Amino acid sequence: MSPRIAKSSLMSKHLIVYTATLTPHPAVSSQAVHGLEVCASLHPEYARALTFTYTLSGDRGRIKIPSPQPSAKVDGLWRHTCFEAFLSGKGDLAYWEFNFSPSGEWARYHFSSYRNSSPLEKDDPAPKITTWRMAHAVKVEASIHLPHSLRAQPLRIALSAVIEEQNGLLSYWALRHPPGKPDFHHSDAFALEIDSPNVQPMKESTR
């Protein structure tokens, strides 16, 4: 099934925005989550910055949202409610993983190939995360600086989330799920394609 992706332009802010709908993995159903959308936006003339805005709607009383914490790199965020983005150059085996918690904590990893970790570029700043908690929704905005090697080539992006309920149930959400168990690292999950960040236009994958 093709992912649901829509492109729009915000000319007043000179932004190109993709809006994508994440779907749950069929192995685990959630009655508490009503929907999960992600907007990915960047300024075509400023190739370093990329912003993801995740909007989770549902029964807030049944969804477990981490409490606010100081911004810090923390491993294992995916064990609780966490929003994720995976970035790769088109045709590359290497990719980066970003985890964004509603708590304000974050994580960043680099892989030279499928689940084969490798050292990070040390000069990249921490993501900036802002969380809005509403009666029936949670919105998390995360802005990152693109890794240097991705700033002048077409991108492939996988968007995903893990949602924890108060009873401990975890559901897994993605733009596209590969066959089998949930696997956000799988190449099939990289369903959003963006031309070189400093040129227009951008397009979605039709795989």
Image (cartoon, rainbow, N blue to C red):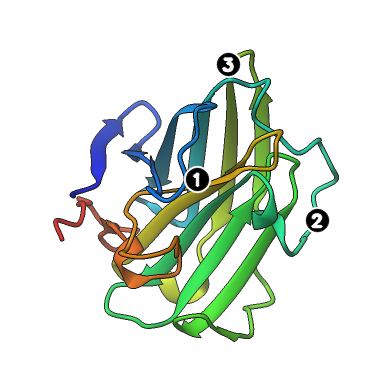
Query: How dense is the environment of label 3, judged by Cα within 10 Å: few (below 14), some, or many (20 and up)?
Result: few
Give the amino acid at mark 1. Thr
Residue furthest right as drawn:
70
Give the amino acid at mark 3. His
Residue located at (28% from left, 33% from top) = 9
Give the alpha-carbon distance from disc 2 to disc 3, as whole Å.
27 Å
Give the amino acid at mark 2. Ala
Point out the tag, 1 or 2, that comes first from the N-terminus.
Answer: 1
Q: Nearer the viewer, residue 181 or 192?
A: 181
The part of the image, by quadrant, that contains residue 97 is bottom right
Per the image, the residue denoted by label 1 is 51
Q: Which one is closest to the eye, mark 1 or mark 2?
A: 2
Q: Are marks 1 and 2 in contact (CB under 8 Å)?
A: no
Image position of 102 (left or right of 31): right
Element at badge 2? Answer: loop
Query: How dense is the environment of label 2, judged by Cα within 10 Å: few (below 14), some, or many (20 and up)?
Result: few
Per the image, the residue denoted by label 3 is 136
Give the alpha-carbon distance from disc 1 to disc 2, as whole Å.
18 Å
Point out the tag, 2 or 3, that comes first from the N-terminus.
Answer: 2
Q: Which one is closest to the eye, mark 1 or mark 3?
A: 3
Quadrant location, the C terminus: bottom left
Residue located at (64% from left, 21% from top) = 60
The part of the image, by quadrant, that contains residue 93 is bottom left
The x, y position of residue 77, in whole percent, is: 70, 55
The x, y position of residue 91, in whole percent, is: 27, 79
Q: Nearer the viewer, residue 192 or 67?
A: 67
